[in-house]
Image (cartoon, grey):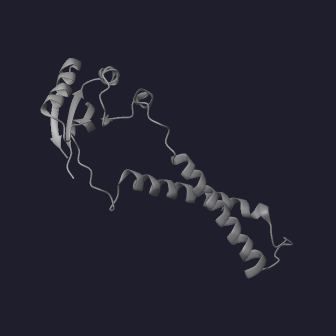
Amino acid sequence: MSKEVLYGLYDDENDLFAAIEKAKAARLDIMDVYTPFPVHGLDDVMELSESRLHIAGFVYGALGTLTALGVMTWVFTRDWPIIFGGKPYFSFPAFVPITFELTVLFAAVGMVVTFYVVCGLGPFGSGATILDDRITDDKFCLAFDTTGMSQIDVEKYSAFFDGTGAEVNRKTI
């Protein structure tokens, strides 16, 4: 399914912030904002909710901890119980380094895979289309989805961009 996108390019992040504020005041539905680098405060201006990726990281880390402790407990107490060096079968201090490493490994790999799935990246992704090559270089972009809009509405969005000093473009993705 293709989308018609009307977008404006700005030279400065301050111009982008001002355009976002004007768009919100005019009750225009912003599709997305693209920047060449992370911009401090953009999440607050866009009123985006906090990512829940850290919750997934905690769950993956807990799974790694439980896996490490469970496997080592099973191996050293049931499967292959050997007393060496006078240690008991379940020697928790000896398990700490491996438990830490598996916690970090599970959290890191799990968060990367989760991020790829959520963002549609990787071999199973949707193959996202770039609106304009200059966005990855030095331009800031404010985009509106104009799919199914009347020409009058599209002209209203174009007039908005003209009023904010943006370079206006349109693309089907």
Residue visible at 50% across and 58% down?
A: 109
Q: Position of residue 145 (x, y in %)?
A: 24, 38
Occupied quadrant, residue 167: top left
In the displayed structure, does residue 151 sit left or right of residue 120? left
Q: How many marks?
A: 0
Q: Residue furthest left?
A: 151
Q: Is residue 114 above or below residue 70?
A: above
Q: Position of residue 32 (x, y in %)?
A: 32, 36
In the displayed structure, does residue 122 sit left or right of residue 50? left
Residue visible at 58% across and 57% down?
A: 60
Q: Position of residue 18 (x, y in %)?
A: 32, 19
Occupied quadrant, residue 130: top left
Occupied quadrant, residue 160: top left
Q: Is residue 76 above or below residue 96?
A: below
Q: Residue furthest right?
A: 86
In the displayed structure, does residue 70 sit left or right of residue 143? right
Closer to the camera in the image, 85 or 51: 51
Residue visible at 21% across and 24% down?
A: 161
Closer to the camera in the image, 147 or 69: 147
Q: Residue furthest bottom?
A: 79
In the displayed structure, does residue 73 sit left or right of residue 38? right
Instruction: Note whether residue 104 is visible.
Output: no
Closer to the camera in the image, 2 or 36: 2
Residue visible at 49% across and 42% down?
A: 51
Q: Is residue 126 above or below residue 169?
A: below
Instruction: Note whether residue 106 is visible.
Output: yes
Q: Position of residue 104 (x, y in %)?
A: 59, 55
